[in-house]
Image (cartoon, rainbow, N blue to C red):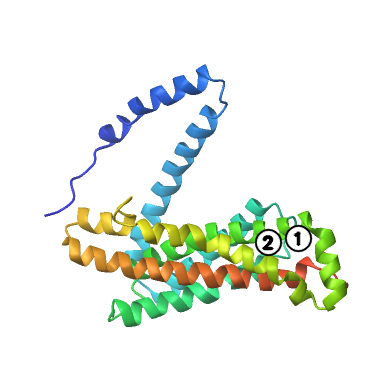
């Protein structure tokens, strides 16, 4: 049993379902129609280019090229995080790069070696696709974590300074904001894990079933990847705050941004 091929005409037919969305937006004066079509157009172009490039990488399947592409993905994730969080300057790119790469590469290698037991742990088909899932979730987790952390400090600046004056330690003064930010980062993943199978059939499981895998195999893969995603997201969020804090505060522990 294989996956049914989707024709380009069939994909275009989805535009019909977009008509009521466009009409309602225009009726209610919701100015997002251009943004919707821009995002869809950008998605089509990006995925088409990535599909061609990945086919090329899969055919070569060279560990060095695979790692280079992984580093490129992490670099893009770092820039996207900086942009989404509203930070200016390039000083946070390196800290975020390491906050992404350290936990996710460790989880990725552990997953390939001990969970799915690959003969070639650098196989592009597994390495890049699994890394993409880990990084995508770490990206959203880091954005939530960083935004919550620095927003809370700004909103409670007097409390932060008071705690700083009492303890004299930046670590103690920042601990409450740190704990709340990490919790906010992983809560969506925890909620997703709790309701998986009841509310949604997630992407990896659905993709494997559509590709012909038996449901039980797909379920085992999905359970494993969800635990891996939670671990990667958790430690990436923690490291992003720790590494960025060296650049975000001055010598007097005052927030610069």
Quarter placement of the C terminus: bottom right
Q: Are the residues tagged 2 and 1 within 8 Å (C-beta)?
A: yes
**Residue assigned mark 2:** 149
Would residue 43 be visible to someone looking at this image? yes
**Residue assigned mark 1:** 153
Name the residue at 84% across, 72% down: 164
- Residue 32 relative to residue 108: left or right: right
The quarter of the displayed image where residue 1 is located: bottom left
Name the residue at 30% across, 35% down: 11
- Residue 218 relative to residue 160: left or right: left
Instruction: Residue 146: give x, y in percent of width and height.
Output: 65, 61
Q: Is residue 32 above or below residue 139?
A: above
Name the residue at 38% across, 70% down: 127
Circle 1 SS class: helix
Q: Is residue 221 above or below residue 53?
A: below
Instruction: Residue 56: give x, y in percent of width and height.
Output: 35, 61
Judge by depth and name the residue closer to the eye, 109 or 175.
Answer: 175
Q: Is residue 16 above or below residue 190?
A: above
Q: Tell which residue pokes out farthest to the top in this image.
A: 27
- Residue 92 relative to residue 210: left or right: right
- Residue 142 relative to residue 191: left or right: right
Name the residue at 59% across, 66% down: 182
Instruction: Residue 255: give x, y in percent of width and height.
Output: 81, 63
Instruction: Residue 95: give x, y in percent of width and height.
Output: 66, 70
Circle 2 SS class: helix
């Amino acid at each position: 049993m294989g996956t049914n091929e989707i024709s380009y005409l069939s994909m275009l037919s989805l535009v019909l379902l977009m008509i009521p969305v466009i009409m309602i937006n225009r009726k209610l004066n919701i100015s997002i129609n251009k943004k919707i079509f821009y995002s869809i157009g950008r998605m089509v172009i990006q995925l088409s280019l990535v599909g061609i490039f990945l086919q090329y990488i899969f055919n070569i399947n060279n560990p060095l090229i695979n790692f280079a592409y992984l580093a490129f993905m992490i670099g893009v994730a770092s820039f996207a995080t900086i942009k989404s969080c509203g930070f200016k300057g390039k000083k946070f790119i390196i800290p975020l790069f390491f906050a992404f790469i350290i936990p996710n590469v460790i989880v990725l290698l552990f997953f390939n070696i001990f969970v799915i037991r690959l003969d070639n742990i650098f196989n592009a088909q597994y390495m890049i696709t699994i890394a993409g899932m880990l990084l995508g979730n770490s990206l959203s987790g880091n954005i939530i974590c960083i935004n919550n952390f620095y927003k809370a400090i700004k909103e409670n600046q007097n409390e932060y300074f008071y705690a700083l004056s009492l303890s004299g330690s930046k670590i103690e003064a920042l601990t409450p904001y740190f704990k709340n930010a990490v919790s906010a980062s992983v809560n969506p993943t925890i909620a997703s894990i709790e309701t998986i199978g009841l509310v949604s059939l997630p992407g990896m499981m659905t993709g494997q079933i559509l590709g012909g895998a038996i449901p039980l195999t797909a379920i085992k893969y999905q359970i494993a990847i969800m635990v891996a995603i939670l671990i990667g997201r958790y430690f990436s969020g923690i490291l992003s705050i720790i590494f960025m804090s060296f650049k975000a505060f001055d010598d007097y522990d005052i927030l610069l941004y």
